[in-house]
Image (tube, rainbow, N blue to C red):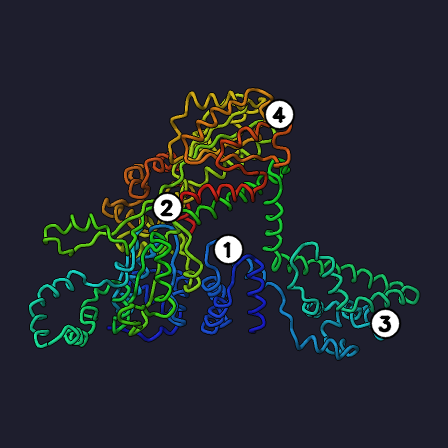
């Protein structure tokens, strides 16, 4: 039973539930108390001891149901299958009755697997599959690309070679039997394929998801396919949650150990300065204030879309975000983003300012005329764009004034550093006035950039 | 009377809690049973008003133990949660004892001798007398054990969690000046959280994790029945059915069990025989706490009532 518990913990890890050794010990102690008799109580026990969030509970619940719907490998039976090759029909009289129409005819000539298939003993077959899966260490399966190799391994372990020989032999001697065997073999392949798929579902889900996310994190945002947009949104939401957890700590905290002498003296004036009541220094932290200027023209639009989604899902961390979108001219889009779903908001923004040829100079001028007062010495200004201004006046002087007014001025450029300054890119000219300039083309770079910006306020 | 023996079975937990008016689902009973068997704290999460705090109260009442409650909030620190030196008392004593000090040291011939004599008094001012025990230390000092409720742990700072780790895993605290204080009898610890922020893995690892969601219809009917005995069966079925319909809406704050009980009380007070549109409209503010929610729910009232009463007919 202990072996089964370990296999279950492994399956739980595969399902994305982080089971630490300490938790598995707890679970074992708990199981020892409640026993295995009542499946519902056993399920509750695992949910209580192993899963520590609601998502994990759901995943573990599914995993539990899947795991216990599988046949358990039965050691005794396996031994039997190996030892009594030929006397198998004797051991299973009930199964033999079903298969005796053709099974009895060529019993002695075919291998154990063929006999098993002919006798149509379903429980024996599933036991054999389970044992072969154990031999092929099926619980190690991680990726869907491994399905083929595990199928082959399991079939090999079950003795498919002998079965093939049998079929070849019988085609000449007894074509009807060969045909039956061929059919049974196809059926067996299907069953094994299902077993492997189920194992993949059980043990490999987390890995597969991690792999997919890893690929997605490093894919250039501007060039992802439409079907991946939804996945990317999910990923961005995950990133936002991670950043929230890391940075949404309280702003005020009492710092014991540093006496606030002035306040202490004032408070204790009534007792002639004997300090009965003490006052301690507090440290105050600002939450980030962000003004984001996003280019929504052409290839930058996608990146801006995800960037705005990320910034606006950071309510707990960021006090105040004002977003502006521009291509030919600039508008404020904070309200559109707050009141609509991400898809609709982006559509609306695009219909208002998108798809023009970008004019950074004009857009900066718009910003200076209308919203310059939004920038305070606590504000971080983020400009997201490729700085390709179609050879129009870049108005770098406005950017300099923005930089002087703000705490930091960060420029995120989706293009690689190699091409900055070539063609109509004004990046080198703008870069002189920025506190930080970063390349920002993938979700991972986006996460790092935003994480750094927020971290400067901690 | 205190009963510190572990309970025999999950059923016993269930009936014991039921005797205190707390109708527990199977999962809750299993959690309570296991926490006693393997001496682990329970971390209870779930939406507001599903009876997380009530659970602790019910356990305390059922087992006849004292309940000590620590309400967490932003900025809670060890001085408020664990122990504090009675600083003012220490200061006052030194002021009063000033003259006494002269007498004691009067016999000393030199400064060194006076210092030696002072040393013999040792750490008078840092002894147990001057420790003000706060909830966590109090819980450890209860001779008959107790139920320690650490309420809304998610409101406290991340640093405070680390402070709890020692008490949760070993049932002891360390006071630098006095040494380690171990629990006389291990308390039953219940932590509650509204999931405002995610708790640290270290804390979660030390606890059984119990999630209490909105109860199923049958269970909720039993809860209302036990809390508001005066309500008729048809009305109870209808109102619980109605609340379940409301919970399917997309609202800011869904009505939870405590609201259901309040509403049942209100309906009994108004002597309503069964639900109708008029009375629901008048009392909807008991269930829903936001103007926008009430507005969203109002147009649906009559269809929900119809659905709820249909259910009543068939079940």
Farthest right residue? A172
How would you rate the neighbour count of disc 1 (Cα within 10 Å): few for under 14, some for 14-19, many for 20 or more?
some
In the image shown, does A288 or A419 lie closer to the viewer? A419
Say which chain tag 4 marks. A
Distance from Cα at disc 4 to Cα at disc 1: 53 Å
Please tell me whether residue A158 is drawn above or below residue A344 in the rendered image: below
> Mark 2 sits on what residue?
B243
Distance from Cα at disc 4 to Cα at disc 2: 62 Å
Instruction: Say which of marks 4 and 1 sits in front.
Output: 4
Q: Is residue A24 left or right of residue B253?
A: right
Q: Are marks 4 and 1 in contact (CB under 8 Å)?
A: no
Instruction: Say which of marks 3 and 4 sits in front.
Output: 4
Q: Earlier in the sequence, mark 4 or mark 1?
A: 1
Q: Secondary structure at mark 3?
A: loop
Q: Is residue A269 left or right of residue B183?
A: left
Say which chain tag 2 marks. B
Q: Are marks 4 and 2 in contact (CB under 8 Å)?
A: no
Q: Residue at x 64, y 70 (%)?
A: A73
> Mark 1 sits on what residue?
A58
Distance from Cα at disc 3 to Cα at disc 4: 83 Å
Say which chain tag 3 marks. A
> Mark 4 sits on what residue?
A424
Distance from Cα at disc 2 to Cα at disc 3: 69 Å
């Amino acid at each position: 039973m202990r072996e089964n518990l370990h296999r279950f913990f492994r399956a739980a890890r595969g399902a994305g539930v982080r089971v630490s050794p300490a938790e598995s010990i707890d679970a074992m102690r708990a199981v020892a108390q409640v026993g295995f008799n009542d499946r519902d109580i056993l399920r509750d026990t695992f949910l209580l001891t192993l899963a520590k969030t609601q998502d994990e509970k759901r995943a573990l619940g599914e995993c539990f149901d899947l795991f216990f719907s599988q046949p358990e490998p039965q050691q005794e039976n396996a031994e039997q299958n190996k030892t009594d090759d030929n006397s198998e029909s004797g051991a299973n009289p009930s199964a033999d009755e079903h298969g005796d129409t053709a099974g009895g005819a060529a019993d002695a000539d075919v291998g154990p697997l063929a006999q098993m298939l002919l006798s149509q003993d379903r429980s024996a077959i599933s036991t054999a599959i389970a044992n072969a899966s154990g031999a092929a260490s099926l619980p190690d399966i991680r990726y869907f690309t491994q399905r083929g190799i595990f199928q082959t391994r399991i079939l090999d372990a079950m003795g498919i070679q002998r079965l093939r020989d049998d079929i070849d032999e019988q085609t000449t001697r007894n074509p009807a039997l060969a045909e039956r065997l061929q059919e049974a073999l196809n059926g067996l392949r299907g069953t094994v394929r299902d077993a492997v798929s189920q194992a993949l579902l059980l043990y490999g889900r987390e890995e597969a998801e991690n792999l997919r996310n890893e690929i997605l994190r490093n894919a250039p945002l501007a060039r992802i396919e439409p079907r991946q947009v939804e996945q990317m949104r999910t990923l961005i939401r995950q990133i936002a949650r991670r950043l929230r957890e890391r940075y949404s700590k309280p702003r005020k905290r009492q710092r014991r150990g540093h006496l606030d002498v002035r306040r202490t003296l004032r408070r204790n004036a009534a007792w002639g300065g004997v300090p009965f009541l003490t006052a301690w220094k507090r440290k105050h932290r600002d939450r980030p204030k962000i003004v984001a200027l996003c280019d929504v023209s052409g290839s930058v639009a996608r990146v801006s879309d995800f960037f705005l989604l990320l910034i606006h899902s950071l309510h707990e961390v960021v006090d105040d975000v004002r977003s502006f979108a521009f291509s030919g001219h600039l508008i404020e889009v904070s309200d559109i983003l707050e009141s609509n779903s991400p898809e609709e908001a982006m559509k609306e923004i695009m219909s208002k300012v998108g798809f023009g040829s970008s004019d950074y100079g004009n857009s900066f001028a718009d910003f200076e005329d209308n919203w310059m007062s939004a920038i305070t010495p606590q504000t971080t200004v983020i400009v997201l764009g490729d700085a390709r201004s179609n050879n129009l006046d870049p108005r770098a002087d406005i950017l300099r004034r923005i930089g002087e007014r703000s705490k930091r001025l960060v420029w995120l450029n989706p293009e690689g550093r190699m091409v900055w300054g070539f063609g109509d890119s004004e990046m080198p000219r703008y870069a002189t006035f920025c506190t930080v300039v970063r390349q920002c083309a993938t979700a991972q770079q986006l996460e790092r950039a935003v994480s750094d910006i927020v971290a400067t306020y901690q | 009377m205190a009963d510190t023996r572990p309970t025999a079975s999950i059923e016993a937990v269930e009936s014991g809690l039921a005797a205190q008016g707390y109708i527990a689902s199977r999962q809750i009973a299993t959690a309570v049973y296991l926490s006693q068997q393997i001496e682990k704290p329970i971390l209870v999460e779930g939406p507001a008003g599903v009876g997380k705090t009530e659970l602790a109260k019910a356990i305390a009442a059922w087992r006849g133990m004292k309940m000590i409650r620590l309400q967490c909030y932003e900025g809670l620190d060890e001085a408020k949660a664990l122990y504090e030196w009675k600083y003012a008392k220490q200061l006052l004593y030194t002021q009063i004892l000033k003259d006494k000090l002269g007498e004691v040291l009067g016999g000393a011939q030199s400064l060194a001798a006076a210092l030696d004599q002072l040393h013999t008094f040792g750490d008078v001012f840092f002894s147990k007398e001057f420790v003000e025990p706060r909830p966590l230390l109090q819980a450890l000092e209860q001779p008959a054990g107790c139920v320690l409720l650490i309420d809304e742990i998610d409101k406290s700072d991340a640093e405070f969690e680390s402070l709890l780790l020692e008490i949760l895993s070993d049932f002891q605290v360390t006071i630098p000046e006095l040494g380690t204080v171990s629990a006389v009898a291990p308390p039953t610890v219940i932590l509650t959280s509204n999931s405002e922020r995610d708790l640290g893995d270290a804390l979660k690892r030390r606890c059984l994790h119990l999630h209490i969601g909105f109860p199923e219809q049958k269970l909720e009917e039993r809860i209302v029945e036990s809390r508001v005995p005066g309500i008729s069966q048809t009305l109870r079925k209808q109102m619980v059915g109605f609340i379940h319909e409301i919970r399917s809406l997309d609202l800011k704050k869904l009505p939870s069990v405590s609201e259901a009980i309040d509403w049942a009380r209100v309906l009994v007070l108004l002597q309503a025989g069964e639900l109708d549109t008029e009375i629901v409209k008048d009392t909807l503010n008991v269930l829903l706490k936001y103007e926008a929610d009430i507005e969203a729910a109002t147009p649906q009232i009559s269809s929900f009532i119809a659905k709820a009463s249909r259910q009543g007919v068939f079940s």
